Image (cartoon, helix red, strand yellow):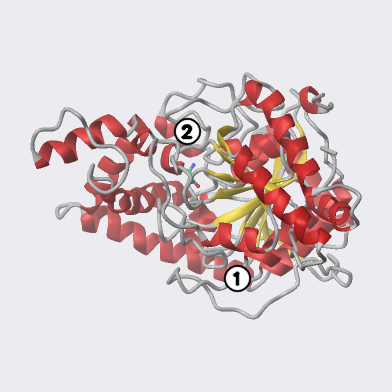
């Protein structure tokens, strides 16, 4: 059953070949058996999931309508709220924080009959690229347990790669869906900014954050987007757009499609990455696409701009964790000032503190113009550069990451870690939809990935075309350690 897509599981359930309780028990057992090696989960919601499965079985028995995700098992990153369950954000600060409302994501998924089996590990407050910044434990890469799965949605990526679940959800502020998807050889999709409601997602960089699906099958990504790509009046940046069909791609092809490649920006690619990237471009060419060179040299500033703006936004978003309203309150505090200072000092990890300090600094009176304002201006130039590029091409192609996954503990220097985001942050800076697709393996047998981005709002077009690429490259290998039944 672990080889099946969510769509296949749904259909088996609707044909009454398998019950929701059987599906749920199957994946709960797989998680119990294999998560000991991987550490994908902060919280497995066995009881809640089984109760829901029973309800769904009952509904089907009574011929009640269930929905597009009838009995589809899935998991979500632990920075999104499920009412009455803990939302830790991978932080000691929120170890006991029980969510008082459902995120819109959860409402939509459960409204269509999905079953949520658990909440997955992440870098603390989604700040990181390796899952090593989780306050609880690092998640491991199913392809090599001594390697990181990427981050910050590392738990979600590793769980799908090891087939502990067919679909998971991540949040992507600067690459946190796409980069771990790349490191684990699964598909990760970051929708257009505003396409998916952020209500109930704990904010990191509000002008960048976007929720999206991670899966082994592109049809599952399309299925999920049909459910979650909806207007939400509880998120002021949510877009109100007509409904579109992501699954219908019969008339779509790469004929007459121009794929732009920023060759100069990519001139220093490592040989293994270059070879794999060129191979992916060749596949697109064989499918009928025209590959053209475009100028996106300005992206050399994207890491600097992102780490100024995202930390500025994070420093204000995280101000709400004051020791009074949510989660941790220091037992050593005697005065109001000490409640703020000690709770934050004891509750936050090193990377979160670093970002709050950096963000506060770039927003401070003396440096606001030199850093924050200047970075905003360069962000506009990046948006304009993409607009110009998209006036001559349909998609922009880049590798997802500058290297394949690295060993746990191998990157100790924060700046070196930030540079891992070189090819992902630009989609967030410009609000564009972008998808990471498995594209093969390097000489050490570690996964590599190909990334396409499109103009804002062209979510359907990018997914339909990604579908063609995905089917041409046929790269749905399973990590050998997990390519077996759990029983
Ligand atoms: N790796 C990036 C960072 O550390 C992106 C994180 C994310 O998208 N949440 O900020």
Report whether residue 199 is seen: yes
Task: For ligand 1, tell me if the residue under mark 1 lies within 8 Å.
Answer: no
In this view, 18 is above or below 65: above
Residue to which mark 2 is pinned: 417
Residue nearest the observer in this picture, 316 or 291:
316
Q: Nearer the viewer, residue 390 or 340?
A: 340
Q: Could you tell me which quadrant the N terminus lies in?
A: top right
Task: Check the image and name the residue furthest to the left.
Answer: 335
58 or 78, nearer to the observer:
58
Q: Taking 130 as reference, is 67 above or below it?
A: below
Residue occupying image coordinates x 27% and y 51%: 320
Q: Is residue 194 left or right of residue 218?
A: left
Q: What residue is shown at x 44% (from left), y 31% (from top)?
A: 133
Can residue 291 be seen?
no
The image shows residue 288 at horizontal and vertical percentages of: 87, 62
What is the quadrant of residue 160 in the picture? top right
- Choose top left, top right, bottom left or bottom right for residue 271: top right
**Which residue in the structure is indicated by mark 1?**
230
Name the quadrant of the C terminus: top right
- Nearest the eye: 183 or 347: 347
2 vs 1, front mark:
1
First in residue order: circle 2 vs circle 1? 1
Circle 1 — which element?
Answer: loop
Q: Residue at x 78, y 36 (%)?
A: 26
- Left or right: 467 in relation to 462: right
The crowd level at tag 1 (other Cα within 10 Å; few <14, some 14-19, many 20+) is: many
Whole-percent x and y of residue 188? 66, 49
The percent position of residue 287, horizontal first and vertical second, equals 88, 58
């Amino acid at each position: 059953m672990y080889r099946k897509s969510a769509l296949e599981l749904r259909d088996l359930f609707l044909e009454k070949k398998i019950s929701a309780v059987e599906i749920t028990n199957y994946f709960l057992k797989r998680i119990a058996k294999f998560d000991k090696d991987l550490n994908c989960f902060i919280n497995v919601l066995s009881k809640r999931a089984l109760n829901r499965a029973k309800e769904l079985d009952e509904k089907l028995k009574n011929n009640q309508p269930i929905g597009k995700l009838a009995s589809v098992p899935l998991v979500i990153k632990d920075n999104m709220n499920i009412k009455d369950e803990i939302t830790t954000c991978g932080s000691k600060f929120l170890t006991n924080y029980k969510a008082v409302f459902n995120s819109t994501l959860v409402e939509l998924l459960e409204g269509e009959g999905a079953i949520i089996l658990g909440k997955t590990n992440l870098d603390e407050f989604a700040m990181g690229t390796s899952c090593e910044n989780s306050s609880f434990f690092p998640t491991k890469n199913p392809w090599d347990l001594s390697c990181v799965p990427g981050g910050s949605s590392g738990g979600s990526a590793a769980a799908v790669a090891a087939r502990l679940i067919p679909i998971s959800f991540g949040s992507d502020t600067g690459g946190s869906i796409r980069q771990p998807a790349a490191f684990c050889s699964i598909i990760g999709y970051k929708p257009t900014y505003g396409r998916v409601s952020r209500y109930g997602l704990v904010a990191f960089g509000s002008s960048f954050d976007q929720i999206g699906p991670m899966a082994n099958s592109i049809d599952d990504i399309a299925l999920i987007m049909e459910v979650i790509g909806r207007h939400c009046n509880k998120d002021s940046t949510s877009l109100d757009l007509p409904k579109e069909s992501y699954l219908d791609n019969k008339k779509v092809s790469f004929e007459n499609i121009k794929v732009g490649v920023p060759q100069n920006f990519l001139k220093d690619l490592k040989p293994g990455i270059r070879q794999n990237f060129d191979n992916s471009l060749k596949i697109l060419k064989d499918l009928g696409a025209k590959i053209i060179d475009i100028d996106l040299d300005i992206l050399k500033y994207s890491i600097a701009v992102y780490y100024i703006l995202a930390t500025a936004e994070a420093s204000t978003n995280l101000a709400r964790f004051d020791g009074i309203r949510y989660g941790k309150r220091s037992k050593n505090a005697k005065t109001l000032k000490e409640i703020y200072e000690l709770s934050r000092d004891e509750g936050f990890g090193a990377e979160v503190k670093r970002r709050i300090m950096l963000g506060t600094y770039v927003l401070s009176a003396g440096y606001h113009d030199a850093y924050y304002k200047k970075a905003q201006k360069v962000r506009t130039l990046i948006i304009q550069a993409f607009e110009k590029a998209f006036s001559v091409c349909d998609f922009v192609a880049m590798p997802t990451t500058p290297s394949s996954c690295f060993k746990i503990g191998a990157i100790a220097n924060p700046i070196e870690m930030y540079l891992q985001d070189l090819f992902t942050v630009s989609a967030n800076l410009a609000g564009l939809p972008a998808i990471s697709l498995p594209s093969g393996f390097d000489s050490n047998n570690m996964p590599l990935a190909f990334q396409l981005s499109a103009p804002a709002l062209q979510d359907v077009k990018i997914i339909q075309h990604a579908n063609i690429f995905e089917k041409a490259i046929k790269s749905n290998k399973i990590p050998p350690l997990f390519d077996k039944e759990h029983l």
